[in-house]
Image (spheres, helix red, strand yellow):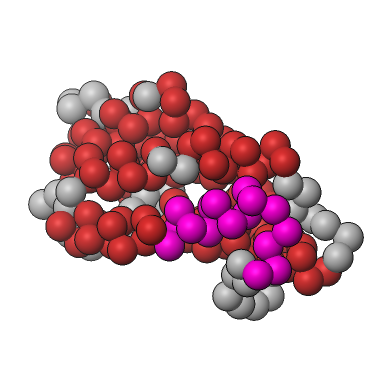
Amino acid sequence: NYLVKTLHYDVNCVRSVFANKPTEFNYLISLLDSLTTFANNPENKLILAANKRIENILVKTKLNKLVTFDAIQGTNSEEITLMKLYNESLPLLTKYNQDGNWGEYFNTLSKFNQPINCFFDKVMVMDEDIDIRINRLNLLTYLHKLFNKTCKLSELA
């Protein structure tokens, strides 16, 4: 209430941060500032919409176990591009999260805008081949966990 009414943060940004039940609050204002900048950038509408889409797919499919994404089994370049970007971004995002470097954290997430959009434009997640489908669902699970590590981005979509 104070963050929204007094400090004038967007209620969806506040919900996004508190959805992940933060345990420390000394970084809250800087996180909200960076998240607000990220959410207000029109280019990031792609990743926010994609994150919401991923969440909906994962809820509907109820994937029971997560296994490693198999890049060899990846049947197109969009899958492989996303997994490479995931592998490159994970250590950076982990470091930025630990350091409270929210500006760089969200700048790194922004790099997923175009690749995730291309993925959904060109890839049928629910492929007829069960192994391909599970592999793609695993990729989406990894991405969803990465995108929502600091705050629940679906609150912003």
Name the quarter where the N terminus is drawn. Answer: top left
Q: Where is residue 28 in the image (x, y as percent from the top left)?
A: 19, 46
Extent of the magenta region: 72-87
Observer able to see residue 46: yes
Instruction: Report the residue at 29% width, 29% height from top.
Output: 37
Instruction: Report the residue at 38% width, 58% height from top.
Output: 88
Q: In this view, does 83 lie above or below 117?
A: below
Q: Where is residue 104 in the image (x, y as percent from the top left)?
A: 24, 44
Q: In this view, does 132 lie above or below 109?
A: below
- Identify which residue, 62 or 136, lies in the foreground: 136
Instruction: Report the residue at 15% width, 57% height from top.
Output: 99
Quadrant in the rendering for residue 3: top left
Q: Tell whether 92 sits left or right of 129.
A: left
Query: Is residue 101 inside the magenta stretch?
Result: no
Give the dominant element type of the magenta stretch: helix, strand or loop.
helix
Quadrant in the rendering for residue 130: bottom right
Q: Tell whether 51 sits left or right of 93.
A: right
